Amino acid sequence: MGAHSVSFERGGVSPRLYRTLFWLGLLLLAILVLGWVQSILMPFATGFVLAYILAPGVTRLEGFGVRRSLGSFAVLIVFLLGLACLLVVLVPLIQGQIVQLIARVPSLVRAFQDQLGNLIQLLQQHLPAEDVSKVRDMVGAKVGEAVTWLAGLVQGILTSSLAILNIISLVIVTPIVTYFLLRDWELMVARIDTYLPRQSVDTIRGQARLVSHTLVGFIHGQALVCLILAIYYGISLSIAGLASGLALGLLIGALAIIPILGATTGFILAIGLAATQYGTWTAILVVCGIFAVGQVVEGNLLTPKLVGDRIHLHPVWVIFALFAGGTLFGFVGVLLAVPAAAVIGVLARFALARYVGSSLYDSPQSSPEPGPENVTSLTRAR
């Protein structure tokens, strides 16, 4: 170590700076590699998440004397059977409502066209004919572009070999990946631990425990939020008499795993269904009230208490993480954005604490005498 330190200092690079540059370069390389293979990440990311969630169960079985391979297989089978039973119960319950929801899509389009026609007639009464013609042409062009883009998107989703490969891999590859990760989880953790730099091993282990605690809190909290929202919107929209209300509530709850997406999608569909089913402003206002109450409760009670207090992230950073994840890694990035932001938050808070305690923040020469008020402020800062 002494020879290495001397060579670094002669080259103008201190060992600490060298290690920092090394880890930053490794992080950038990992991001680049993930960007290159993002199209096939879905089954592996899903398998890793499932293995992370199910690993404590396998470890508990191992404590009872069950072999790791057998315990991994048993836990995975129980999870898949539970998921299958849930689908068997829910699919017949909402199948008819989903069919009705799909069947109403053409009527939603026609209702939009009627409202657009009424708007153009209103403009004709207050604007010159030339301006109305320009507005009609512009709206027609934009609607045509939107329809073309949507049709291309749907066609790409349905016909893309890559999309079909992702669906097949989710069904077939994900359970296999999950099993092997569960079986070798302890070995992988131990192997990674052997590669940690020895001078910082205790610090890294401590931060890893904080990261694990944060991720577990996020998973449990977000699952509870999704369940509560699904029950609330399903019951509320059904009581309001909205067709496919139960199916729509379950859809909102499932999409709520991605913040903002579930409520936005559900609100647009619910407004459209209310407009075509009732055709009155009263029904639309009732739906708006249901979503307003749901968003107030979710934004001020559910998410802050069940998720925010566990991951310690401001809502603005959550939104930024969603956009950044989607831009970098597509749909997989959106799914993993909030957990990744939580991990980055843990590491950032650790880095800030080290910075505040270092000479970069306050050199010993300029530090005031450690009076009671300074000790209190320093304790609060840390």
Image (cartoon, grey):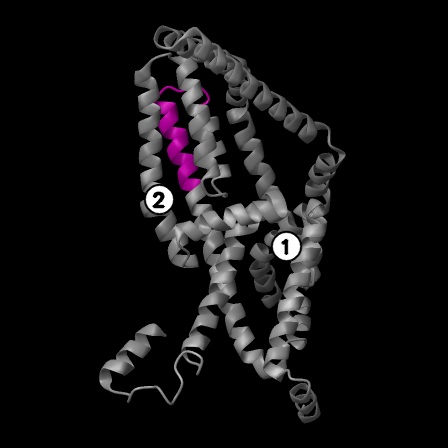
> Residue type at mark 2?
Gly
Residue 239 relative to residue 333: left or right: left
The question of residue 229 being in magenta is answered with: yes
Q: Which residues are magenta?
A: 227-244
* Residue position for label 2: 299
The quarter of the image holding the C terminus is bottom left
Location of residue 237 in the rendering, given as x and y in whole percent from the top left corner: 38, 26
Location of residue 116 in the rendering, given as x and y in whole percent from the top left corner: 45, 13
Q: Look at the magenta stretch and give its main secondary structure.
A: helix
User: Alpha-carbon neighbours of circle 2 within 10 Å: few (<14), some, or many (≥20)?
Assistant: few
Q: Tell me what residue is drawn at x 57 percent, y 43 percent.
A: 82
The quarter of the image holding the N terminus is bottom right
Residue 150, picture quadrant? top right
Q: Tell me what residue is drawn at x 35 percent, y 25 percent.
A: 287
Q: Of 250 and 126, which appears nearest the observer? A: 126
In the rendered image, the vertical position of residue 205 relative to residue 265, given as above or below: below
* Residue position for label 1: 48
In the rendered image, the vertical position of residue 268 relative to residue 262, given as above or below: above
In the rendered image, the vertical position of residue 280 relative to residue 59, given as above or below: above
Residue 251 shows up from this direction: yes
For the residue labelled by badge 2, is the local secondary structure a helix, a strand or a loop?
helix
